[in-house]
Amino acid sequence: MKKTILSVAVIFALGFTSCKNETKQDPETTTTEASKDIAMADISFGVRGNCGMCKSTIEKAVNAVDGVENATWNVEKKKIAVSFDDSKTDEMAIHKAIAASGYDTEKVAGDLEAYEGLPGCCKYDHDMAMNQ
Ligand SMILES: [Cu+2]
């Protein structure tokens, strides 16, 4: 009985000291950083497409996602660079928005109906290498 009481006391003491250590770690710097620049994330990944019209369709789809600040698709590299506020959206939401507009990304295949509705010159090859 005495032993259990002792070990419980030890666990409490350990837990208490570790909590203390956590709160000690510069609470001011973390809070000010978080409120200053609103957690912007920069990502890039492959997206298939052919031409300037594809570029505007893809970029328009990405810019329509709430939280996206900037999107630039590179026609030669078949690659998009996106800056977004990651408290408002995430990478998968961006992949899905592009796929919904008919374009393949590295993670999500383009919606076939939307693909069929693309102008002839934009009907890209589904085997095209992306993120070159
Ligand atoms: Cu096109």
Image (spheres, rainbow, N blue to C red):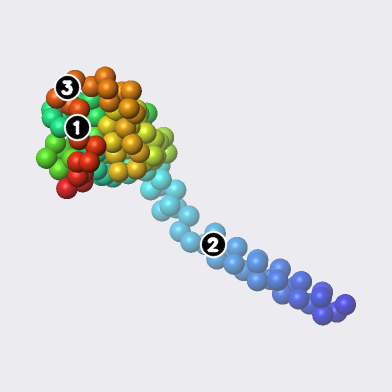
Label 1 CB-ligand 1 distance < 8 A: yes
Look at the numbered disc 2 and say if its residue's Cβ is closer than 8 Å to ligand 1.
no
Q: Please tell me whether mark 3 sits on a helix, a strand or a loop.
A: helix
- Residue 103: tell me if it is visible: yes
Residue type highlighted by circle 2: Glu
- Residue 50 x/y as whole percent: 15, 32
How far across and down, in percent of the image, does residue 5 sit?
82, 74
Residue 130: quarter of image: top left
The numbered dot on residue 22 is: 2
Give me the C-alpha separation between circle 3 and circle 1: 9 Å
Amino acid at dot 1: Tyr
Q: Secondary structure at mark 2?
A: helix
Q: Quadrant of residue 15?
A: bottom right
Residue at point 28%, 36% (across, down):
104
Judge whether residue 69 can be spotted in this image: no
Residue 80 in percent (x, y) is at: 22, 39
Per the image, label 1 sits on a secondary structure element best described as: loop
Mark 2 vs mark 1, CA separation in Å: 53 Å
Rounded to the nearest angstrom, the CA distance separating label 2 from label 3 is 59 Å
Q: Quadrant of the N terminus?
A: bottom right
Q: Circle 3: is it few (<14), some (14-19), or many (20+) Cα within 10 Å?
A: few
Q: Which mark is residue 120?
A: 3
Q: Amino acid type of disc 3?
A: Gly
x 33%, y 23%: residue:
113
Residue designated by label 1: 124
Which of these two is toward me, 25 or 64?
64
In contact (CB < 8 Å): disc 2 and disc 3: no
Q: Nearer the viewer, mark 2 or mark 1?
A: 1
- Classify residue 69 by image quadrant: top left
Foreground: disc 2 or disc 3:
3
Q: Circle 1: is it few (<14), some (14-19), or many (20+) Cα within 10 Å?
A: some
Task: Please indicate whether residue 111 sits to the left or right of residue 57 in the image.
Answer: right
